[in-house]
Image (spheres, rainbow, N blue to C red):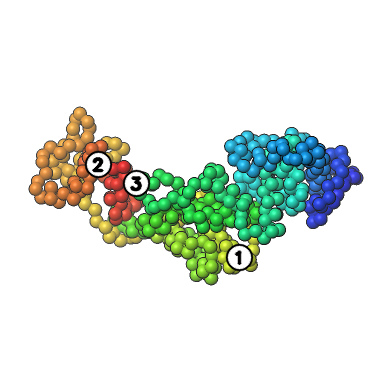
Amino acid sequence: MMNVSVYTSLTNNHLGSAVPTRPNPVSVSSIQDNTGSSSDKVQASTVSTVSILAGQLSDAASREVRLRQLDPRHNALNPLDGISDERYFANKAQHDAEVPDTPFLELHERAKQATAFANGSASNPFTGLTVDQLTLIARDDSGAFTVNERRAAWQEARLNEQRASASSGSTIGRELMISRLFLGHEPAVAEGTLNRSNMAQSNYDFLTRDDRTLLSDMYAYAQEQGADLAYVDMLAYDLGNYRHHDNGRQLLSGNEGYNQEGRRVTFNFKAHDIATASRILSGSAIDSTRLDQGFLRHVLNPDFGALSNMGSIAFLEQMVLRFSSEGAAQASLGREFTTYVPTSIKDNMVVTVAEEVTLIFDDPVLINTDGLWTITEKGKAAGYTMDPATGKPRRAVAPTVDERQAHSGVAGAVADVLTTRSLVDTLAVNQDQSSAQWLWPGHLLKWMKNLKT
């Protein structure tokens, strides 16, 4: 192995606070040969990487001194503006695509990690540096560091300052919350419950001030732990949906339905999620957690939560513990939260179909299969015939008095619908739908409401 002279000022494998003088850069390839052991090569690579960063810091310090000499009153533009305000998000796609202009592989990897960190899927590459070193990187707009590297350094510096001052706020977390949930512009808290005028409005708008403060802290904590921020996104969506629907009071149980054969269909979490939900609901942390207890009891009830379980109950448990009186004793987040893997609802729940038929349906008079109409024997007896011009069934005779009385409730309910949809279409049964389709009592009213809108 070749001997390479490098300067080091290291403590626990991190750069010390002193900024050394920069020697000529040394690439990894120049310090490896075929005679050295693998451990020697890894050590050389680590030292070389630290040496390159130290050289960059030395150059950045020199540029900062010149800048202060040229502009002692700080009249020029603040170099932090482009990485700390809305301009960063306006050009984020360009920043994410930026590649450092250097032959060093280590610097390309570091820039890639900084971009992943900016998007919530990696840890901060500058964790462990001092505030002074982080500030040098953040302020250096010479091109030696990518924009995402500078922003990562700026965020780490602010987190370090907050830790040092024991600040209860989470400025970085709040910025993450606003950028991820509100695309950079936080709206006022939306008032009211789900209705026709706000049904298309974002669930996030209904998050309360306390919700947003807590989610900000969750984003800061998840990023500090190297967790994928998508876990917090999914929790925020569930909480916003709960708020939007009058704290869950407008959401109907999913376990009151039947399939087309009349068999009861019920839904539950998978076994590991059942165990986790039980720990949360029976544990002591739920009494002091900052998460709304009503929300926890709602989303962990399979009657409501199983049909919308796309997040992670395991991550929810970690947040319940962390932001409770027991948070100080909680261990760090595990590596299982490093990358969020989307899961479909059907793969995240257990469906049970009863053997006994308990709901009896009337035989249909009309059947539609892939757009083709069929008149059943019952339909023919009721006077339906096929219109050769339209290919759709029509009633050839007027209904009897008994039939009119029997269907008077349906006729009144769908009166507004008939302006855009025929009664034939309304009452038809689509045979192409599988027997596993689920029907819930009360869904006819919701279905007619949707048709009106």
**Mark linked to residue 196:** 3
Q: Residues within 10 Å of mark 1 (few under 14, many from 20)?
A: some
Q: Residues within 10 Å of mark 3 (few under 14, many from 20)?
A: few
Q: Is residue 425 left or right of residue 267?
A: left
Q: Which mark is in front, 1 or 2? A: 1
- How far separated are the C-alphas under marks 1 and 2? 55 Å
Which residue occupies the extreme front position in the image? 73
- How far separated are the C-alphas under marks 3 and 1? 41 Å
**Mark linked to residue 327:** 1
Q: Is residue 347 left or right of residue 43?
A: left
Please give the residue where the numbered disc 2 appears in the rendered image. Answer: 417
Query: Would residue 70 be seen by someone viewing this image from the given angle?
Result: yes
* Amino acid, disc 3: Arg
Q: Residues within 10 Å of mark 2 (few under 14, many from 20)?
A: some
- How far separated are the C-alphas under marks 2 and 3? 17 Å
**Residue shown at 28% from the left, 59% from the top:** 357
Q: Is residue 137 left or right of residue 390?
A: right
**Residue shown at 45% from the left, 46% from the top:** 202
Image quadrant holding the C terminus, namely top left
Labelled pair 2, 3 in contact (Cβ < 8 Å): no
In the image, residue 56 above or below residue 343: above
Q: Which mark is in front, 3 or 1? A: 3
**Residue shown at 73% from the left, 35% from the top:** 143
Q: In terms of secondary structure, where does tag 2 sit?
A: helix
The answer to which image quadrant residue 75 occupies is top right
